[in-house]
Image: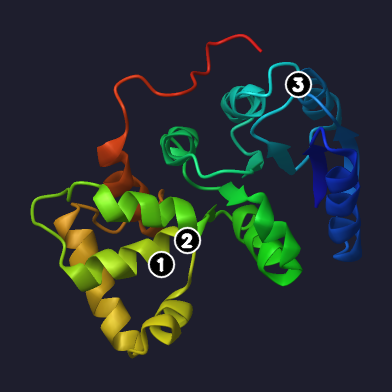
Amino acid sequence: MRVVIAEDLVLLRQALCRILVQDGITVVAQVGDADALVSAVVSERPDLVIADVRMPPTFTDEGARAALILRERFPELAVVVLSHVVEPTLAMRLAADRPARFGYLLKDRVLDIDDFMAAIHRVMDGGTALDEHVVAHWLGGAPRAGPAALSAREREVLGLLAQGLSNVAISARLFVSERTVDSHLSSIFVKLGLPPSAEHNRRVRAALAWLRGETRANPDVRPDQPI
C-alpha cells in the first residue's frame, strides 16, 4: 500500500507516518497544504490519501475540497480525511456519491493505533469508516427514509453499520446473535429499497442513503470550487 499524508501539523504528520510504516505501509509523500497534496497524488499515484480537512492558507475546507477533486479525478483512490471537530454535513457531502473507499475520522482516533489502523485497512478494502460521533449526530436527528420507518433497533444497527462494523462486531456490541443482526439488516435493506447488487456495497449504501436524507441544499464544498 502506498500512501500520501497531507497534514500541516508537522508532529502529527510525522506520527502518522511512523504508525503507517510500522504497519508495513509505504508513505510516498508528506505534504502540508492542499496544492501540494494534489501535486503529490498526480506524481506518485498512491493507493490512499490521508488528509486534514482544514489546511493552509485559510484553514477552512482546503483539504476537503482537495479530497473531492482527487476522488473525481482518481475514482480508485481511497481517501481518509481527519478533523478536529465533528462536521457531519461535510462528512456526508464527501461520502455521498461514492461511499466506498472513504473514511472520515476525528483526529483523536489516531491515539488508538489499533482502531485507527483497522479503519485504514477497512477503507483500503473498499469499505467506509465514519467516526461514531458523526454517525451519532445524524442518527439523533435525521428523518427516517425509505418506504417504511426504521425501528429503534434498526436505527441502532444502522448506526453501527455506518461506522464500518461487521455483523460479528455489531452482535457483540448489542449483545444479540449474528442471526438477529442479519434479520435487522435484511429488514433495513428492504425498507430502504436496496436489493442485492454485485456492483455496489449495499451495506455502505444503506447507511449513507439514509444519512443523506439530512444533506443540506447548499453543501459545504463542491468539486468545482478552486483550491
Foreground residue among 66 and 70? 66
Say which residue appears at 57% left-offset and 27% top-offset: 68
Using the numbered discs, state the Cα–Cα distance from disc 2 to disc 1 in whole angstroms.
5 Å
Using the numbered discs, state the Cα–Cα distance from disc 2 to disc 3 in whole angstroms.
29 Å
Using the numbered discs, state the Cα–Cα distance from disc 1 to disc 3 in whole angstroms.
34 Å
Q: Amino acid at mark 2?
A: Gln
Q: Please name the residue that numbered disc 1 is placed on.
A: 160
Q: Is residue 110 left or right of residue 76?
A: right
- Which tag is nearer the camera, tag 2 or tag 3? 3
Residue 105 placed where, x, y %? 60, 51
Q: Is residue 44 left or right of residue 158?
A: right
Classify 10 Å Cα crowding around label 2: few (below 14), some (14-19), many (20 and above): many
> Quadrant location of residue 176?
bottom left
Classify 10 Å Cα crowding around label 1: few (below 14), some (14-19), many (20 and above): many
Q: Secondary structure at mark 1?
A: helix
Q: Please name the residue that numbered disc 2 is placed on.
A: 163
Q: Secondary structure at mark 2?
A: loop
Task: Check if mark 2's residue and mark 3's residue have beta carbons within 8 Å.
Answer: no
Q: Please name the residue that numbered disc 3 is placed on.
A: 56
Q: Is residue 169 above or below residue 138?
A: below
